[in-house]
Amino acid sequence: MSGLLKEKLNYDKTFDCVQCGYCLPACPTYETMEKETHSPRGRINLVKMVAEGKATVEDLKEPIEKCLGCMACTTVCPTNVQYGAIFEGAKEVIDEEEAKSKPKPRKLMEDFFFQSFFPSSKWMKSLGNATWIYQNSGLQKVSRRFGLTKRAPLHIHEFEAALPSMPSPKKRKDRASRYVRKRPAAAKVGFFTGCIMDSVFFESNQNTMELLLRSGAEVVFPEEQTCCGALHAHSGKIDTSIELAKQNIVAFEEESFDYIVNNAGGCGARMIEYDALFESGTEWHERALHFVSKVKDISEVLVEMDGLVFEKELQRTVTYQPSCHLRNVQKVENEPLELIRQIPGLTLKELDRPEFCCGSAGVYNIVNYEDAMDILDVKMKDVCGKNPAGVVTSNPGCLLQMKLGIEREGLSREIDSVHLVDLLMEAEPRPK
């Protein structure tokens, strides 16, 4: 095998794995699929064998594509194996191998989604506006009445049922890009809007900025920002992911910010690793390090600023489903819980296995639907055991997946799923 292939597969890093098996109980796919090849240990071994010419890239394809990328294995690994780098390297090699035989129409469609659709704020706004028209023109009622949505591929009808109500195109258009305080600001925040977050969960983004304002911050969102690149990296399109990282670094260099805040676990996890995309000692590496030093999840900033008091009592019980990338990559565990506990009247019952992935994982639940539902069923058993009225989470994928899980359990009248920022706004926060 060539040295280049070994380098792309991060062959040297595979030797950090001593095959001890500590990762096995932490891996959702190992639990639900019960195969060694669908565990972190098995996948690393396969990567090593491909690099040594003892297995083919085709042998690697299914085990890698069935991996959620939740990184729960990295939190229990005693030898600190860099599984994320090995996983992304394998994805890149598989994508390059597939490109040789991929039908042209499929390649054109992928190029459109990864190079034009997700990185474009205009496309994201168009998606949100089209969904608003669908929800408010009567099309949604007609489609549901005659079962038209059930004919859509990839179980789209189930995800469509879990979508929140969209804001009008006018409300999107009228949003300002800068919120300046009359009083001196306690901090200047650059807000990362995210692509899916801003398209589907626009109101949660608005609530995030409102929380920052009430905490005493000035909020700006640079209009030249783009997709974080997580979806691209997890699909093997590393070069495009690097270009998106560069665009975001440039966009947030336009002004001096105390924090670069996001409210999506997956986006934040990607952005705090931007420095790893560039060779140490280069100009881009230095610029990425500066960017990374300011990236924070909204919960971290709200706790750090400590500028809010919640006035409204919420007399109900909730549980908290942490985003894997917020917990396992960003290492943010306590801040969301601390904020939830500040809400008067609210009872928090923590999950028995909060570290277990919900099965969303970007587009995993779309392309690996049945496997994702097996994982979701495990999660919902834990959720239902707490008998909550709400599931709080902090990532768009988790939010939709939990809504889907609640629908599957037939509990949509008893349980709701909400983003952390929406729950905090419901509790009527005011400045201290």
Image (cartoon, grey):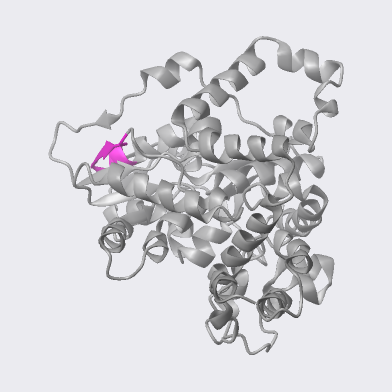
The residue at the point 70 percent across, 75 percent down is 50
The residue at the point 72 percent across, 48 percent down is 365
Q: Is residue 298 visible?
A: no
Q: Considering depth in this image, is 23 or 83 the residue closer to the camera?
A: 83
Q: Considering depth in this image, is 75 or 416 the residue closer to the camera?
A: 75
The residue at the point 53 percent across, 74 percent down is 7
117 to the left or right of 187? right
Name the quadrant of the N terminus.
Answer: bottom right
Residue 429: x %, y % from top left? 37, 39
Residue 111: x %, y % from top left? 59, 39
25 to the left or right of 177? right
Q: Considering depth in this image, is 372 or 205 the residue closer to the camera?
A: 372
Residue 403: x %, y % from top left? 69, 41
Give the vertical position of 165 relative to 391 (above or below): above
The residue at the point 87 percent across, 16 percent down is 146
Residue 142: x %, y % from top left? 79, 13
Name the quadrant of the C terminus.
Answer: top left
220 is within the stretch colored magenta: yes
Give the vertical position of 405 relative to 223 (above or below): below
Q: How many marks?
A: 0
Give the vertical position of 166 relative to 415 (above or below): above
Q: Quadrant of residue 121?
A: top left
Outermost residue, top side: 137
146 to the left or right of 328? right
Q: Is residue 301 visible?
A: yes
Write the start and end of the magenta stretch as one range.
212-222
Q: Quadrant of residue 280?
A: bottom left
194 is within the stretch colored magenta: no
Outermost residue, left side: 184
